[in-house]
Amino acid sequence: MIYRKLDKNGDYTFGSNGNCYLSGAEAVRQAVVTRLRLLLYEWWEDLEDGLPLWQKILAQRDRTQAEKAIRDRIASTQYVTAIKTFDCQWNAGTRSLSIAAAIDTEYGPAQVNEVM
């Protein structure tokens, strides 16, 4: 798997030839992060694709349902074979959702740490 690198702002990187791409487990990790950042109804080409952050996670406040939606999104990412560990924390003070997961991929292990 080859995936274009994202910079610290989440934008594609350009201009460094092969240095603008990730491969292997790191590419799968970034694919998971990208899929977590895509919100439901956000992509015009497929409005049903995306994490239902507002609809089922924050609005419902049902931790079990929220964790299931996030786990399903991670597990359904191409080349992810298993989720080894998973932790999801809501910080009401900063209004942020932290997701940490250790995943197995077809290329080896990877660690996902995302704050939304």
Image (cartoon, rainbow, N blue to C red):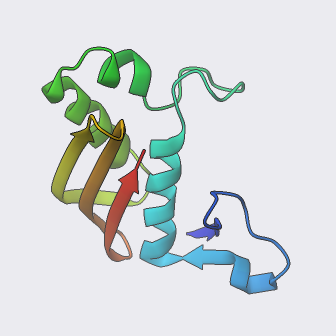
Q: Position of residue 80 (x, y in %)?
A: 35, 58
From this viewpoint, which residue is outermost toward the right?
15
Query: What is the quadrant of the N terminus in the image?
Result: bottom right
Q: Quadrant of residue 102?
A: bottom left
Nearer the observer, 37 or 27: 37
Residue 52 visible within the image: no
Nearer the observer, 19 or 8: 8
Nearer the observer, 108 or 62: 62
Disc tally is: 0
Relative to 80, is 71 on the left or the right? left
Q: Position of residue 70 (x, y in %)?
A: 31, 38
Q: Residue at x 42, y 74 (%)?
A: 25
Q: Position of residue 106 (x, y in %)?
A: 36, 70
Q: Position of residue 33 (x, y in %)?
A: 46, 54
Residue 12 visible within the image: yes
Q: Residue at x 64, y 69 (%)?
A: 5
Query: What is the quadrant of the C terminus in the image?
Result: top left
Q: Residue at x 33, y 23 (%)?
A: 58
Q: Residue at x 35, y 41 (%)?
A: 94
Asked if 49 appears above or below 109 in the picture, the reply is: above
